[in-house]
Amino acid sequence: MKIASFNINGIKARIGALTDWLSEAEPDVALLQEIKSVNEGFPRAHFEDMGYIVETHGQKGFNGVAILSKLPLEDVTRGLPGDDSDEQARWIEATVIGDKTPVRVCGLYLPNGNPVELDEHGNPVDGGKYAYKLAWMERLKTRAQALLDTEEPALMAGDYNIIPQAEDAERPDAWRNDALFRLPSRQAFRRIEHLGFTDALRATTDAPQTYTFWDYQAGAWNRNDGIRIDHVLLTPQAADLLQDCQIDADIRAREKPSDHVPIWIDLDA
């Protein structure tokens, strides 16, 4: 079962690039972020014609997540539990029925958190974007524990907007005060991972410069000035099925690319 995660940075702007990649990579499941479309505006029929079941959790102009699956889906849910007042479309999950075993897949678009707004004591300002990011991650930790408690194959994949370690950035010093790399952000990520999850990429390679994002500005792609912020975290039962994890970095050089590239795993499922 090939499962990919891809922040496409706008379905309308990137439908051609996404279609080309889907045709070449042929993932069984693609978890998409930043579709930037309401559910009714998503080009569902286009991807259904490609053989995909389509489930979306959209929002006008911002955010938005989706699941494209060639395999049957069950129990699709939308929205990260823990805050009924949160209207941002950042979470979708479903059970994928594989040939050998079902896998619970969770697609996420974690808040960016910038600008970092702090009070005079250095604490995140209530109502600010950084406070929202950290609160969202606390809710994510609760959902992550619930996934572990099922003792079944499950994963959480998407744009985490977290640079876990210095080796995950070409120029880590440039990100020290950014919400993606501030110590509280990395600590929150580590608390989730240390519940018992496996970082799929780091379980399969220790290669340097394994990035998933290059900014559009200042020739970042040409200089390989990248960061790794798209991750796949696996429960122990899913980690036991892991056969491979790769980043399709080459598509960043194509026409009208997203600033992210796909990361995918292969499970014996």
Image (cartoon, rainbow, N blue to C red):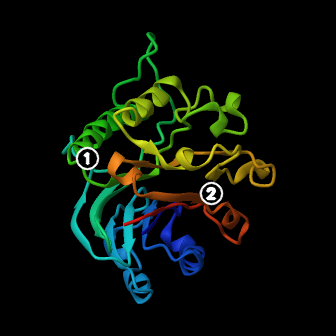
Q: Nearer the viewer, residue 1 or 108?
A: 1
Q: Is residue 228 left or right of residue 94?
A: right
Residue 12 pos. (x, y %): 51, 73
Q: Amino acid at mark 1?
A: Leu
Q: Residues within 10 Å of mark 1 (few under 14, many from 20)?
A: some
- Which image quadrant: the C terminus? bottom left
Q: Earlier in the sequence, mark 1 or mark 2?
A: 1
The residue that label 2 is drawn on is: 259
Q: Is residue 255 visible?
A: yes
Q: Nearer the viewer, residue 87 or 233?
A: 233
Residue 134 pos. (x, y %): 38, 32
The quadrant holding residue 61 is bottom left
Label number found at residue 160? none
Q: Is residue 108 visible?
A: no
Q: Nearer the viewer, residue 269 or 45?
A: 269
Label number found at residue 147? 1
Q: Amino acid at mark 2?
A: Asp
Q: Is residue 206 left or right of residue 232?
A: right
Q: Is residue 258 left or right of residue 268?
A: right
